[in-house]
Image: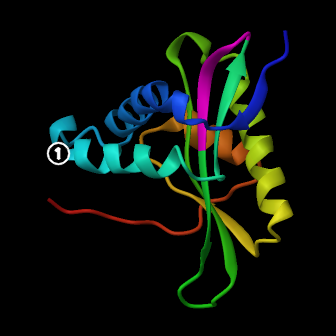
Amino acid sequence: MKPIVRNVKPEDAEIVKVFIKEHMVMNYPELPYSVLKEKAEADIEKHCTEPTSFVLELEGKVIGYLALSIDTDRYSRQKIGVLHMIHIAEPFRGKKYSHILMVKAEEFFGQHHVAYREISTNVNNEVAINLYKKHGYKLWRCKLKKA
């Protein structure tokens, strides 16, 4: 059976909560989840009601999640597409499902006529970086941190 991409529904909140937690832990390994929990739970409330959030469903089971937004570049004032998160459940990784969500993101941004698209991820998340590069994204800015 072919997977489908659909908008998030309120009944998806529990699985989306799991995906957001896993995503936060993977992308912020230096912070305990207890520090990230408030932000993650606020994201769940927001994303489960926004038309810019999608799930990937396979045989009636939600296996992936995509969170997008349309924003405005603070300098150029151009409309931009922001890909906040792609997450595939552990047992389904490595099977190209993330590419389906990337295609959905590109379609969505195309429909909204954005000037450009942006994504950020942890510098050590090579799987995500390679996925984004396969879809035409290039390194644009570099953010450094000193603790």
**Residue 64 is one of the magenta-drawn residues:** yes
Side (left or right) of 57 relative to 13: right
Residue 93 vs 80, above or below: the answer is: above
Percent x, y for residue 114? 76, 71
* Residue drawn where x is 47% and y is 24% of the image: 15
Q: Quadrant of residue 27?
A: top left
Side (left or right) of 122 relative to 40: right
**Secondary-structure class at tag 1:** helix
Q: Nearer the viewer, residue 134 or 106?
A: 106
Which quarter of the figure is the C terminus placed in?
bottom left
Q: Nearer the viewer, residue 136 or 112?
A: 112
Which quarter of the figure is the N terminus placed in?
top right
Percent x, y for residue 61? 63, 14
Disc tally is 1
Residue 102 vs 19, above or below: the answer is: below
**Residue 143 is one of the magenta-drawn residues:** no
Q: Nearer the viewer, residue 5 or 117?
A: 5
Percent x, y for residue 13? 47, 32
Residue 123 visible in image: no
Main secondary-structure element of the magenta-colored stretch: strand
Q: Which residues are magenta?
A: 59-66
Residue behind mark 1: 35
Residue 85 visible in image: yes
Q: Quadrant of residue 28?
A: top left
Side (left or right) of 31 relative to 60: left
Residue 46 vs 31, above or below: the answer is: below
* Residue drawn where x is 65% and y is 53% of the image: 52
In the rendered structure, which amino acid carries the disc numbered 1? Val
Percent x, y for residue 30? 21, 42
Q: How is the image coloured?
A: rainbow
Classify mark 1: residues with Cα within 10 Å, few (<14), some (14-19) or many (20+). Answer: few
* Residue drawn where x is 22% and y is 36% of the image: 33
